[in-house]
Image: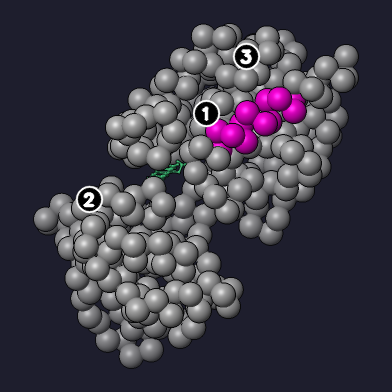
Amino acid sequence: MSDALEQVVVIGSGCAGYTAAVYAARANLAPLVLTGAMPGGLLTTTSIVENYPGFAEGIDGTDLMIQMQSQAERFGARVQFGSTVEVVDLAERPFKLTVDGQEVLAQTLIIASGAGHRHLGLESEEKLEKKGVTYCATCDGALPMFRDQPLVVVGGGDSACEEATYLTRFASKVYLIHRRDELRASKIMAERALGNEKIEPVWDSVVTEVLDVAEDKVTGVRVKNVKTEGESVIDCAGVFIAIGHVPNTQIFKGQIDMDDAGYVTRVEGSRTSVEGVFVAGDCSDNVYRQAVTAAGMGCAAAIDAERFLAASD
Ligand SMILES: Cc1cc2nc3c(=O)[nH]c(=O)nc-3n(C[C@H](O)[C@H](O)[C@H](O)COP(=O)(O)OP(=O)(O)OC[C@H]3O[C@@H](n4cnc5c(N)ncnc54)[C@H](O)[C@@H]3O)c2cc1C
């Protein structure tokens, strides 16, 4: 770990972080990229990415991230594997970071720490992830395994309604399972979902098990009605869990403006409420959450950081 004063430190190595690193490196800023516990970010947890521009046949998620890493390194980015920022002090520049117990000083910071999906917390859910259990309809909905099949969406908010509506393009039927007797979603989203003849709401219900671990693929869900305690099984080929996201921004809490859910607020472009701190990707985006949007935001953050440094010289 370098104890020198860094021009640009990038926290995170997903699409946002590595794209920021490519741009900052090409601007001769030799950015330091701290990968965190998940080098390459969330895309390394999926197989084929079919909607990242430039890959007509799709590309394996891990391969794509290795390409981004190599591209950043080619221009002088320094990638510090496994390094997790434990504490930040944004009170004054240079910013102080504690990384694996050591101090790093940074003139500018690009926060690209991503967001995790909320899980149901079921053992069967974990075992069948990528075998029919997914957390992103936009990413996985069009996969052949889900076409013309009954699917389940779990959740009752805007995301759940949007995912359910989107999935009706591919599925034979979509069951929308919600723990209450009405949706939390905005009126327009709820009406759109409930007005879709392919969507059948399953009220007052929670998924207690994803079936079938023994078959190593999703064949259905076991559902409990929270009012009657009655159990039933819904046959389906896929389970889309849309119960929210948790941005990885806890270490910045109290030092930078964020919304109630923890997404870092962008003030102008990628700027944050702290001068010299920029943000990119899913940790600041509760709407799109896509690889290409995260990459685009990473590009913007690096350009903003570069201009900020130039103006401060
Ligand atoms: C299973 C799955 C499939 C997907 N498929 C697609 C798809 O097909 N197409 C698509 O466009 N999108 C897809 N997505 C969404 C896509 O992965 C995300 O939108 C994208 O990865 C967001 O990039 P990011 O850089 O903002 O964050 P992430 O990829 O989440 O990366 C966050 C990075 O921050 C690091 N980090 C976190 N905290 C710290 C810390 N304290 N210190 C240092 N580093 C830290 C992590 O280690 C990680 O490297 C998929 C997501 C999942 C889960």
Q: Is mark 2 within 8 Å of ligand 1?
A: no
* Residues in magenta, as a range: 294-305
User: 62 or 113, which is in the foreground?
Assistant: 62
Q: CA distance from mark 1 to mark 2?
A: 30 Å
- Looking at marks 1 and 2 on the same chain, the residue that comes earlier in the sequence is marked by 1
Residue labelled 1 has its Cβ within 8 Å of some atom of ligand 1: yes
- The residue that mark 1 highlights is 13
Labels 3 and 1: the sequence-earlier one: 1
Residue placed at 58% from the left, 13% from the top? 77
Residue 299 vs residue 165: left or right?
Answer: right
Type of colouring: one colour
Are the residues tagged 2 and 3 within 8 Å (C-beta)?
A: no
Q: Residue furthest bottom?
A: 228
| Secondary structure category for the residue under label 2 | helix
Which residue is under mark 3?
A: 25
Residue 162 painted magenta:
no
Which circle, 1 or 2, is nearer the viewer?
2
The residue singled out by tag 2 in the image is 144
Instruction: Please name which of the two marks, 2 or 3, marks the residue nearer to the observer.
Output: 2
Quadrant the C terminus occupies: top right
**In this rendering, is residue 80 above or below 97?**
above
